[in-house]
Image: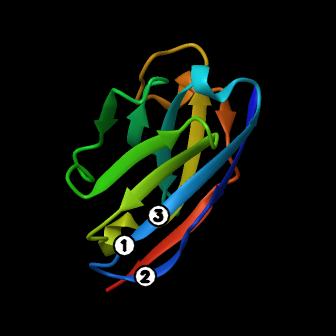
Amino acid sequence: QVQLVESGGGLVQAGGSLRLSCAASGRTFSSYAMGWFRQAPGKERDFVAAINWTGRSTYYADSVKGRFTISMDNAKRTLYLQMNSLKPEDTAVYYCAASSTVGLSTRPGDFESWGQGTQVTVSS
């Protein structure tokens, strides 16, 4: 497995921006498909965005399409999530995840490695 550590969360006003980072260590990062998920209090963990191991294919939840951008830097072994035009409903703990078994997925069960999460709070 690969070890993942998220950072970059915080408190921001509606309309603002944040960039989340996910640093990877362990096995070869460049062979993994990666994803971002989020979980609000009392709710299930939801898919946000995914990227395949080449970085050429991405997929977004409808709720964030056009506002969030997922990217990866294999040389730095880091995954990013640029979040713009943030809304109060984006408030959640954000998790990055890695999969060595699928090319691109929106399902949490396809990802075997998870970070500890970073809190994002958007005030109205």
On the question of residue 12 being in view, the answer is yes
Residue 25 point in image, percent of width and height: 76, 38
Q: Quarter of the image holding residue 49?
A: top left
Q: Is residue 77 left or right of residue 81?
A: right
| Tag in front: 2 or 3 | 3
Task: Label 1, secondary structure: give it.
Answer: loop
Q: Quarter of the image holding residue 28?
A: top right
Q: Of callouts 2 and 3, which one flags the residue occurring earlier in the amino acid sequence?
A: 2
Q: Is residue 35 left or right of residue 76?
A: left
Label 2 – label 3 distance at C-alpha: 11 Å
Which residue occupies 31% across, 86% down?
A: 124
Residue type at mark 2: give it. Answer: Val
Residue underneath mark 3? 19
Res. 36 mark? none
Dot 3 crowding, Cα within 10 Å, few <14, some 14–19, many 20+: some
Q: Quadrant of the N terminus?
A: top right
Q: Of callouts 1 and 2, which one flags the residue occurring earlier in the amino acid sequence?
A: 2
Cβ–Cβ under 8 Å for marks 1 and 2: yes
Residue underneath mark 1? 17
Residue type at mark 3: give it. Answer: Arg
Q: Is residue 82 left or right of residue 64?
A: right
Which residue occupies 63% across, 43% down?
A: 76
Residue 58 point in image, percent of width and height: 33, 33
Task: Label 2, secondary structure: give it.
Answer: strand
Residue 119 point in image, percent of width and height: 57, 67
Label 3 – label 1 distance at C-alpha: 7 Å
Residue underneath mark 2? 12
Is 57 placed above or below 8 here? Answer: above
Task: Label 3, secondary structure: give it.
Answer: strand
Cβ–Cβ under 8 Å for marks 3 and 1: yes
